[in-house]
Amino acid sequence: MSNLHAWFLALRPKTLPASVAPILLGSALAFSEGYFNTTAFCLALICAFFLQLAVNFANDLFDAQKGVDTKKRLGPLRGLHLGLIQSDQLKKGLWLVLGIALVSGFLLAAMVSWWLLVFGLASLIVALVYSGGPYPLASYALGELLVLVFFGWLAVMGSYFIHTHNLTLESFVYATLVGLLSAAIMLVNNLRDCYTDATAGKKTLVVYLGERKSRALYRLLLLAAPLLHWSQNPRMDDWAWLPLLLIAPLLFLLFRRIGHLQGKELNRMLALTSLTLLIYSLSQSLLLVLVG
C-alpha cells in the first residue's frame, strides 16, 4: 500500500456523501422556493466537506492512540496503525482541514448571520471530542444521535437558512430524513466494529444494544426514509415518486442483508447505505430544482 493510498483511505470516501447530501438538499429546497445564493452554497459545501474530513482524520488519530484500531479491525485498513502515515503527519492534516472548515464557515457567517458561527464552532468541537479527549462522545453511545443533529438537522436546515433566512417544517422533515439515513451509516459502521470496540472499551450504541436490537434499529432507520418522503408528498404527484423508485432496490437489499451479514461483509453494507443517501439526496434535489 502506497503512502498516497493510505491518505486516500484516511479520507474515508464512503462516508463523504453524508457531508455533501444535506447541503444539496437544503439548498435545492430553498431554490424551489425562489431563493439561492451561489457564494453561500459553495462556502457551505466546502465547510461541510472539510468538517467531515476532520471527523475522519480525528477518528483515525484518536482510535489508533487508544488501541481501538488494530490490525484485527474488520473495516478498511488505516494508514496510521499500519505505520504508513505518522501521527504527526495526520495531526497536520487534521489541523489543515479544520482550518479550511473554519475559514469557510467564518466567511459564511459574515455573509449570512453570525449565529452560524456558533453552530460552526460547535461542529468543530464535536469533530475533535467525538473520539478524543478524556470523555470521547463516541464511547457514550452518542454517535448516531450526533450524526442526526449535525449531518441532518443542522446541515439541511442550516443550508436552507443561508438562502432563505428562514426555517420551515418542510426543511425539518427533509433534515430528519437525511439525518436518519446518515445515522444508519454510522450504525452499520459500529455494528461491524462492535467486538473490537467493546474490547477497547469504546461503548458505542451497538455495544449497549447488542447485535439483534441494533440490526432492528437499522431497519427502522431505513423505513423512516420513504415514510418521511411520503409525508411531504402524500399525493405522489409531479414526479414525487421518482426518488423512492430509485432507492427502493437498495432499501430492499439492505433491509434483507442486515439480518445475516457479519464482520467484513458489513463494509459493503456501509457503502450501499451511503449510496442510498446520495441517490435520494441527488434525485430529490434535482426534482425540487426542476419541478419545484
Image: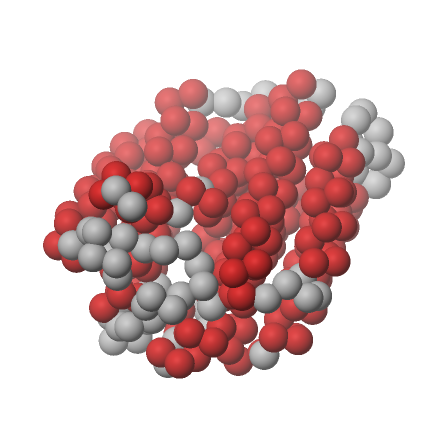
Of residues 38 and 278, the one nearer the viewer is 278
Q: Quadrant of residue 75?
A: bottom left
Q: In the image, what residue occupies the spot 83% across and 41% down?
A: 234
Image coordinates for residue 231, horizontal then vertical, percent: 77, 46
Q: Find residue 237 and report its image quarter.
A: top right
Residue at 41% in and 54% down:
76
Asked whether the viewer can see residue 19, the reply is no
Quadrant holding the C terminus: top right
User: Is residue 153 positioned above or below 192 on the image?
Assistant: above
The residue at the far right in this view is 235
Q: Is residue 256 above or below residue 114?
A: below
Compared with residue 137, is residue 93 higher up or lower down, i.e. above or below? above
- Is 239 rendered above or below residue 55? above
1 and 237: which is toward the camera: 1
User: Of all residues shown, which one is farthest toward the front?
Assistant: 1
**15 relative to 55 in the view: left or right:** right
Numbered-mark total = 0
Position of residue 283 measured from the top left corner of the image (x, y, whole percent): 65, 30
Position of 174 with respect to 49 (left or right) is right
Q: How far across and how far down the image is residue 199, in percent?
A: 40, 81
Residue 100: image quadrant is top left
Residue shown at 66% from the left, 32% from the top:
284
Q: Is residue 22 in view?
A: yes
Q: Position of residue 42 (x, y in %)?
A: 39, 26
> Camera-side residue: 81 or 244?
81
- Give the left or right position of residue 252, taking residue 144 as reference: right
Q: Please say which color scheme the image uses.
A: secondary structure
Image point (33%, 66%), residue name: 71
Outermost left residue: 88
In front: 210, or 70?
Answer: 70
